Amino acid sequence: MTTMMNSMPLQLQHAVEHALISSGALLISHTICVAIVMYMDLTNKWAKYSINPNRNVSIDDYTIGLKSFVFDITCLFFPFMTFCFYVRDQEIRESSDSATWSLTKLACGYVLGKLWAFGVHYVLHFPSLYHLHRRHHCNPRAIVASAAWMDSKTEYAVMELPSFAMTVLLFPTHFHVHALHFVLHGWDGAAGHSGFKAPGILGALFDGEYHYYHHAHLTMNYAELEFLDILCGTHHTQHKHHQKYIFTPPTDNNEKKIKSER
C-alpha cells in the first residue's frame, strides 16, 4: 500500500489519504452510534422509548444495514471523495481560514447538502421514481439505526454523494474540519433511524422520532432539517391526516386509517 501511494503524484496521494480518513470518520462514527442503539434495543433497555409499540427487530436487521453501508463506503463513497479531494487539494492544504470561518463553511456545506438531499428525496417519492427508493422504506416496526443508507446504488449516488461533497467542493477549508463533517454525517444518519425517542441528553443524541414519521406515513418529513419541511409545507405538523397522531406513536391500526383517508 505504501509503495503504491509513493508512486502516485503528490496531489493524488493527498486526495487518497483524505478520502481514506473521511471514509474512516464516517464509518467509525456511524458504527459507534449503531452499536450503542443496537445494544440498548436488543437488550430491551430502551423498550420504553420505542416510538412504535409494536417494534420487532433482530440482529439480522442491523447486520443487513451495516453490510449495505460498508459496500457504499468502499465502492462509491471512497472513489468519489478521492476525486473531490483531488479537485480541492490545494485549497484544503493551504487553507488559512480561522476556526470561526472554517466552522461557518462547514455549517454552510452541511445545510446545503441537506437541502440537496431533501430535494432529491422528495422527487424519489414520485411514483415513476419510487422504485429507486423503495428499498430504504422498511417496515416502520423494524426500522434500525444501520438502515440509514440501506438504499439503491442509484439513490446513494444521486442523493447522498453530492450531499457529502458540498462542503469539500464548494467550501474547502482545513481538512480536520472536513473530517468532522463526516463524523456528523455518520452519527446523525444512524441516530435519525434509531426508532427511539428518549428524554434529555439521550433524546438529543439518538432522536429518531422526526424521521420515523416519514417512514410510517411517507408523505411528510422528507428533510433531515425540520425547517426545510416547514418552509415547503411537508412538516408533520402541517399534515392534516397526521395532526391527531402527532403525540402518540403510529400503530398498525392508525397507519391503515391514514392510508384509507388519502
Image: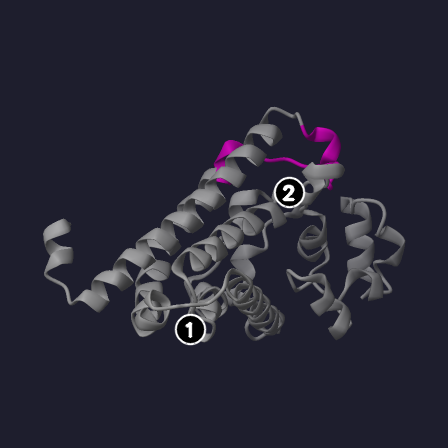
Identify the element where label 1 is drawn.
helix
Residue 236 at least partly seen = yes
Left/right placement of residue 13 relative to residue 131 reads left
Which range of residues does the magenta coloring cover?
A: 46-62
Left/right placement of residue 105 relative to residue 208 reads left
Q: Which mark, by number, is residue 169?
A: 1
**Residue 131 belongs to the span the image colors magenta:** no
Q: Amino acid at mark 1?
A: Leu
Where residue 36 appears, x then y in whole percent? 55, 33
Where residue 103 appears, x then y in whole percent? 54, 62
Q: CA distance from mark 2 to mark 1?
A: 28 Å
Residue 229 falls in image quadrant: bottom right
Closer-to-camera residue (226/125) = 226
How is the structure coloured here? Answer: one colour
Q: Residue at x 60, y 46 (%)?
A: 191
Identify the element where label 2 is drawn.
helix
Determine whether 122 is above or below 211 in the image: below
Q: How many marks?
A: 2
Query: Circle 2 is placed at which residue position?
Result: 205
Residue 71 at least partly seen = no
Q: Residue at x 84, y 45 (%)?
A: 248
